[in-house]
Amino acid sequence: MIEPTSTATEQQESGRGLITALVVLAASACAVLLIWVINGAQQDPYVRASLELQGDPDHGGQLFRINCAGCHGLAGQGLLAPKLAGISERMRDPALIHQIVSGDTPPMPSFQMEPASMADLLSHLHKLS
């Protein structure tokens, strides 16, 4: 007996299932990567030192205006670069530190600063709304 070939509907459903599986796989990979970055960052001595300090938001504001405002806007509203207002609700501090020092997302440069200055900058970023 000859098996009937699949219908267009069956092929579409099969394609949707494959797409769904790929989306789930990609989301899982992103979640694992994010956990790895955050956990790895928390073990990093620089990140740990920065997070242990109480930052000065006024000095952080000066650092922000000098280094960040040209692209992110004076109030963090976003200009050439993404909006940073409310960033502390969207991103944890270890990931923020990684973003600032890594330069992984061009055209953003990497910024190297002492842990005290990073704590100051984080303190300012927490106040942006």
Image (cartoon, helix red, strand yellow):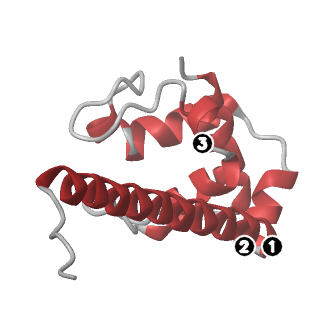
Q: Label 2: few (<14), some or many (≥20) within 10 Å?
A: few
**106 sits to left or right of 23:** left
Q: Give the residue displayed 73% in from the left and 35% down from the top.
A: 56
Residue 80: image x %, image y %? Answer: 21, 39
**104 sits to left or right of 9:** right
The answer to which of marks 1 and 3 sits earlier in the sequence is 1
**12 sits to left or right of 19:** left
- The residue positioned farthest toward the top in the image shown: 129
Q: Is residue 71 above or below residue 43?
A: above
- Quadrant showing the N terminus: bottom left
Q: Is residue 115 above or below residue 123?
A: below
- Quadrant showing the C terminus: top right
Which amino acid, by three-letter code, is at mark 2? Gly
How far, Cα to Cα, is label 1 from label 2?
A: 5 Å
Return the residue at label 2. Answer: 40
Q: Give the residue displayed 41% in from the left and 27% down from the top.
A: 76
Q: Say whether residue 19 is visible.
A: yes
Residue 96: image x %, image y %? Answer: 58, 51
The answer to the question of whether label 1 and label 2 lie on touching residues, with beta carbons closer than 8 A, is yes
Residue 16 circle label: none
Return the residue at label 3. Answer: 91
Pick whichever, 55 or 107, lies toward us: 107
How far, Cα to Cα, is label 3 from label 2?
A: 15 Å
Residue 2: image x %, image y %? Answer: 17, 81
The answer to the question of whether label 1 and label 3 lie on touching residues, with beta carbons closer than 8 A, is no
Q: Say whether residue 112 is visible.
A: no
Residue 33: image x %, image y %? Answer: 58, 68
